[in-house]
Each structure stands twice: as structure tokens, then as C-alpha cells.
Image (cartoon, rainbow, N blue to C red):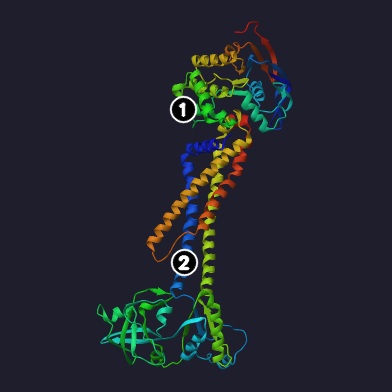
């Protein structure tokens, strides 16, 4: 459950204040499929970063699962991020020197989960995502689609409630992009809240709920009557 | 995050940037090796000197004529006279002390030694039969100076190994006659080759009874008296007794200087230890330089791996964990580098030992511990700044690689 109230994010560019987010309020229920669309510079990525606790709002309140996480320390925010939030990026952001399996295990390493369980969980995900024969390969030896699937596996290995994707298909061709989206949607159907940021209307319209942002404000918030 | 995982991750990161890692380890290794080799050299010099002193004899007390103290004005000083001479009887009187085991008077001069047409100008040492024991000398052939009344001049001599070789070649010298100055002496023994000890090379000496030497050089005074105490514990008492006896015999005049081998040894020991510390310190400076290098490279690493740090943060790494990862990296680096340096240093020490067998080089344990400690501490200390910088990176900016 994500609740944002009057969230503002102000950047200083030179001596000018730029309002990346102006008074944004948003509530996302568990298991929702939400897309955020809008032109570049409209604040959609900033919004995603704030929801993902990578960025702090200049003002406003953010509650996650009923808990106010706005004022938490870096340490506590890192913990929340580890346990409740999964991130998928446009450029995958895998650690280049680690194998696919090691990349997937990384969040569990940070959480201090014992190696035996790490291995079991990463293997299950590798099998589910059809990457079992790629487990020992390093990112540079994987195709774009495979890399993004590894990244999704890494984002979901801690079984977070929220999965955030920032242009997840931006670096992929149409076919692989679709595969990746299907994978994300499949995870959403298993009750994982999915928020996708995209500038591509075709992708955005797949979501049950669609936000349009302009100049740091939510311009429209529409729901499809019938979920896909 | 488990410590083993931290180490594994840091190790992986080090392997990911091999050239960088190797260069840093090299810097660290050279620093540690420098400390090890330099202190080993210093320690070798110390042991060499201590060894030289010990080969002089054990529990030695050495008596010189004259006071080395400059305080006050003695009557002899005004008239330009040297202090009262030490005589053979002075030396023999010292055996009265119960702390004294043996006494050997020394009278030294230089004389022409000749056999047939071969001549050598060599130092001639006059002493008594006890000198052999006191100085721990060994004979190659024959006997040493005969015991008996030291006042009796006897026409016998003992040749140093080199002198014997030069005068007689490979022929047996014992039993032959040699001419020393204007007198003839029969060779009764030849010393085993012992090499130099404290500038006195027994190989190049000729030894004659002390009275014979005094007659040769027409001099009744002794250069010094070697006194051997019964035990280490007796050294102090022997020294006091020597002073007392000499004062008594010289009409209350304190006109001899007595040094103990222990005191000289201790002084040299102190000086050379300080020297070792000093060169070790110079080596340690290179360790400091290596530390700064580590800081530099770690700062570059943070810049290079900004994106990776961003990713780690995005998947839930706390600032403390990031800090720890970089810390672990620097620690591993300095640990491996220091170990490599230790091996390198020991190889260097071994090589020096092989090249100069005379010098007993060996790195003292405290230097090894200090080198390793300094290496690791500097490595960690200088990684504080980079680690903190990494931990403070803004995740959003870091992910975009800015």
C-alpha cells in the first residue's frame, strides 16, 4: 500500500528552483498495475525514485504499508528498500563482474541470508525465468532480454510487495520488450504491485491504471474498467 | 551481511580490476619488503659487531693506562708526562683478586721478521700463555707460549696463520728459527686462521713472551692488560678490584682506565639498535606512501564504480554496508600486499645472506610485526575517506553515472 500526500521535490539548478514534483498525491493499493506516462522532464522518474526511496521529497509524506517512511534514516530506508521494493532499470544495471546467479543473489547477500538458501532461491528464479543455462554467464555474455530478466529476478528475489520499473523495455527490441513486459505482468498477477514508467503509450495502456504527468503534476489518473 | 560475504565481494571487486590491484599490491609489497630488508641489514650489523666482541673473549675486563676523564688537572698533565706505566708486575698483581680468573698482559710493537731472505714487517705481540684461553684462540700446529714465570724471557714465538704462510709457504714452521728484530726465536706453534676481530687480525701477528717483547722494543710498559673474570656476575667486582689494586700499586693514583666488554657491547648494541630503528623508519615512510597510493586508487575506484554503488543502494545496501565493502577491499589489498612484501623481503634477506655470508642478516621479529601492522593500518586508515565518499553517494545520481 503506497500513500503519497502533497509530495514536492525541488531541484536547484543554478539559482533557479525547479519543481520536479509539485504537490503530488497518490494512493496505490496492493497488487495494482500502474503505468506512469508523460513527456521527458515531467517528473515521472522522480516520482518513481521517491516511491522507491532512492530520493527524498522536499516536503510531503510518504507512507508505505501504513508506516511513515519519509523521515527514516538512510540505514532504515535501505532496509525498507531491500525488503519491500524491487527496482528494474532501463539499462539493467547488473554488476558486470558478477555472474547472472551472483547478481540475483546480491540482495540476499546484503540481507545476510545464508548461502544455501541463496542458492536455492536464485536457482528457482533462474528456472522460472528460463535462465538456468545462463546462470554462470556474466552480463556481457547475455542478450538484452536475458539481462533484463536477470535484473527482474534480482528485483524480486527478496519477494518485495512493490516492483518499480523505469522504462524496462527502453533498451530492448519490440519482441523482447514484450516478453519482459509479460514477465512483469505475470509477477503482478501474483499480487505484486507493479509501477511502470514509460513514455511509450502502447506499453502504458496495458496497465489497469494509467497516470499522465505534465510539469510535475498528475494530469490524469484513469482506470480501465476491465483489467487486462 | 555476513563477514565472509563482505570479503568475497571485496575479493571479487579486486579481481575485477586486476592491473590496479596488482599495482597497489606492488606498492605495498615494496614498502614492507624495504622495511624487512633494511631492518635485517641493521640487525645483521648489530649481530656482527656483537659477535666480534664476543669472539674477543668472555667476561673480559680491559685495563688501559691513563685516565680518560678530563675533569681536574693532574700533576702529570702539566709537565706533559704520560701517566704512570703499567708494568708486568701490575698485571700479575691483579690475579690476587678472587673475581679474576686469568690475566694476560699485552705489549705490542712492530718488528721485522725474517727467515733466510724473506722479510716481513709484522706486529709483534708480547703476552703470556693465558692469552690463548682469554682470547679464545686456536692453534693449528704446535704449542702456545709456554707457561711458567712470565719474567723469564724465552726465545720462542707463535706465528699467525698468514705470517707462517708468507714466511714458510706450505712447509712446517714449527721447530724453525726466525729472526725478530735483532733476536732469534724458535717457532713453537702456529695459530689457526681466525680472521679479523675488532681490527686485530691474529692471522698477521707474531706472538712472543711478554718479557721478550719488552726487551725487543726496549719498553717496560704494557699497552693493556686483559683480565678474565670468573663469571658474568664477577665482572663488576673484578673491575673494582682491578681499580683498587692498581691504585694501591700506583701510590694512590687512579691512573688506569678499566672498561668491561659488557659495557662496550651494550653501547654498541644500543647504537646499532637505534640505527636499525632509524632505517626501519625510513622504510616505513615508503609504507606511508603506499598508503596514500591506496587512498588515491580507492578514490578512483569509487568514481569508476559509481554506478555499481548506485545499484547496490537501489537493491538495499545501507551506507554502512557500502563503507564496509570498500574497507574490506582496502584491507584485503594491504593484507595481500604486505604478505607478498614479507615474502619478497625474506627472499631479499636470504639473497644478501648468501652474497655476504659474514653478515648475519635477519629481520628482527618486531620489525616484521611492525611492517605488517603499519601496512595494514595505513591501508585501512587511507581507505576511510574513499569508503565514506562511496557511502554518501546519492543513489539517483550514482545510477545515472553522474
Q: Is residue B119 above or below residue B362?
A: below
Quarter that holds the C terminus of chain A? top right
Q: Residue at x 69, y 13 (%)?
A: A220
Q: Quadrant of residue A16?
A: top right
Find out whether the residues at labels 1 and 2 contact each other: C-beta distance under 8 Å: no
Task: Determine the chain carrying the residue at label 1.
Answer: A
Q: Quadrant of residue B246?
A: bottom right
Local crowd size for mark 1, using a 10 Å CA cut-off: few (<14), some (14–19), many (≥20):
few
Residue B29 as seen in the image, left or right of residue A40: left
* Residue B255 position within the rendered picture, expressed as x and y whole percent measured from the top left: 55, 88
* Badge count: 2
Local crowd size for mark 2, using a 10 Å CA cut-off: few (<14), some (14–19), many (≥20):
some
Query: Is residue B400 something one can see in this rendering?
Result: no
Residue B143 as seen in the image, left or right of residue B402: left
Q: Secondary structure at mark 2?
A: helix
Q: Which residue is mark 2?
A: B47
* Residue A194 position within the rendered picture, expressed as x and y whole percent measured from the top left: 61, 17
Which residue, as the protein is rendered here, is positioned at the far front? B98
Q: Which residue is mark 1?
A: A140
Q: Is residue B359 above or below residue A150?
A: below
Task: Determine the chain carrying the residue at label 2.
Answer: B
Which residue, as the protein is rendered here, is positioned at the far left? B171
**Could you tell me how far apart the alpha carbons at marks 1 and 2 are, in whole angstroms?**
59 Å
Q: Is residue A57 above or below residue B22?
A: above
Quarter that holds the N terminus of chain A? top right
Q: Residue at x 35, y 91 (%)?
A: B154
Amino acid at each position: 500500500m503506497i500513500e503519497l500526500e502533497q509530495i514536492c521535490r525541488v531541484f536547484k539548478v543554478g539559482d533557479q528552483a525547479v519543481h520536479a514534483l509539485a504537490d503530488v498525491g497518490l494512493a496505490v493499493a496492493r497488487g495494482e498495475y500502474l503505468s506512469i506516462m508523460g513527456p521527458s522532464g515531467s517528473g515521472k522518474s522522480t516520482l518513481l525514485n521517491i516511491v522507491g526511496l532512492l530520493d527524498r521529497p522536499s516536503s510531503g509524506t510518504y507512507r508505505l504499508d501504513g508506516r511513515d517512511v519519509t523521515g527514516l534514516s538512510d540505514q532504515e530506508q535501505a532496509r525498507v528498500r531491500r525488503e519491500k521494493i524491487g527496482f528494474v532499470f532501463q539499462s539493467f544495471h547488473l554488476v558486470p563482474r558478477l555472474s547472472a546467479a551472483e547478481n540475483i543473489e546480491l540482495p540476499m547477500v546484503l540481507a545476510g541470508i545464508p548461502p544455501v538458501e541463496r542458492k536455492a532461491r536464485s536457482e528457482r528464479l533462474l528456472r522460472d525465468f528460463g535462465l538456468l543455462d545462463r546462470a554462470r554467464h556474466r552480463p556481457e555474455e547475455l542478450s538484452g532480454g536475458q539481462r533484463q530478466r536477470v535484473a527482474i529476478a534480482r528485483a524480486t528475489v527478496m519477494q518485495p510487495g512493490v516492483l518499480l520499473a523505469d522504462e524496462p523495455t527502453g533498451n530492448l527490441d519490440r519482441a523482447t520488450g514484450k516478453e519482459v513486459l509479460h514477465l512483469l505482468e505475470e509477477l503482478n498477477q501474483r499480487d505484486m504491485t507493479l509501477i511502470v514508467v514509460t513514455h511509450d503509450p502502447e506499453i502504458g495502456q496495458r496497465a489497469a491504471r494509467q497516470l499522465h504527468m505534465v510539469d510535475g503534476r498528475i494530469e490524469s489518473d484513469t482506470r480501465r474498467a476491465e483489467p487486462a | 551481511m555476513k563477514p565472509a560475504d563482505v570479503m568475497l565481494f571485496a575479493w571479487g571487486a579486486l579481481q575485477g580490476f586486476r592491473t590496479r590491484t596488482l599495482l597497489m599490491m606492488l606498492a605495498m609489497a615494496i614498502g614492507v619488503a624495504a622495511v624487512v630488508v633494511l631492518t635485517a641489514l641493521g640487525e645483521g650489523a648489530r649481530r656482527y659487531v656483537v659477535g666480534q666482541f664476543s669472539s674477543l673473549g668472555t667476561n673480559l675486563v680491559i685495563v688501559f693506562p691513563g685516565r680518560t676523564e678530563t675533569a681536574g688537572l693532574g700533576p702529570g698533565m702539566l709537565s706533559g708526562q704520560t701517566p704512570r706505566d703499567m708494568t708486568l708486575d701490575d698485571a700479575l698483581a691483579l690475579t690476587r683478586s678472587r673475581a679474576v680468573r686469568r690475566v694476560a698482559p699485552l705489549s705490542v710493537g712492530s718488528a721485522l721478521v725474517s727467515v733466510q731472505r724473506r722479510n716481513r714487517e709484522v706486529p709483534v705481540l708480547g703476552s703470556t700463555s693465558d692469552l690463548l684461553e682469554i682470547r679464545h684462540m686456536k692453534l693449528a700446529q704446535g704449542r702456545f707460549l709456554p707457561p711458567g714465570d712470565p719474567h723469564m724471557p724465552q726465545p720462542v714465538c707463535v706465528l699467525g696463520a698468514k705470517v707462517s704462510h708468507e714466511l714458510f709457504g706450505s712447509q712446517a714452521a714449527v721447530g724453525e728459527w726466525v729472526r725478530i728484530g735483532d733476536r732469534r726465536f724458535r717457532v713453537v706453534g702456529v695459530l689457526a686462521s681466525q680472521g679479523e676481530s675488532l681490527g686485530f687480525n691474529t692471522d698477521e701477528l707474531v706472538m712472543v713472551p711478554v718479557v721478550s717483547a719488552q726487551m725487543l722494543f726496549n719498553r717496560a710498559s704494557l699497552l693493556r692488560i686483559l683480565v678474565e673474570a670468573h663469571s658474568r656476575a664477577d665482572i663488576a667486582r673484578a673491575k673494582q678490584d682491578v681499580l683498587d689494586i692498581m691504585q694501591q700499586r700506583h701510590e694512590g693514583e687512579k691512573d688506569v682506565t678499566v672498561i668491561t666488554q659488557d659495557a662496550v657491547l651494550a653501547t654498541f648494541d644500543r647504537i646499532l639498535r637505534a640505527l636499525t630503528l632509524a632505517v626501519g623508519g625510513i622504510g616505513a615512510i615508503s609504507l606511508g606512501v603506499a598508503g596514500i597510493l591506496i587512498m588515491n586508487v580507492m578514490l578512483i575506484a569509487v568514481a569508476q564504480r559509481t554506478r555499481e554503488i548506485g545499484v547496490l543502494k537501489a537493491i538495499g545496501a545501507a551506507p554502512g554496508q557500502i563503507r564496509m565493502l570498500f574497507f574490506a577491499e582496502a584491507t584485503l589489498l594491504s593484507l595481500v600486499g604486505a604478505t607478498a612484501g614479507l615474502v619478497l623481503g625474506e627472499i631479499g634477506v636470504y639473497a644478501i645472506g648468501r652474497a655476504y655470508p659474514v653478515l648475519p642478516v635477519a629481520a628482527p621479529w618486531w620489525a616484521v610485526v611492525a611492517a605488517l601492522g603499519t601496512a595494514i593500518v595505513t591501508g585501512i586508515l587511507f581507505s576511510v575517506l574513499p569508503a565514506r565518499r562511496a557511502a554518501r553517494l546519492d543513489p539517483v545520481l550514482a545510477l545515472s553515472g553522474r
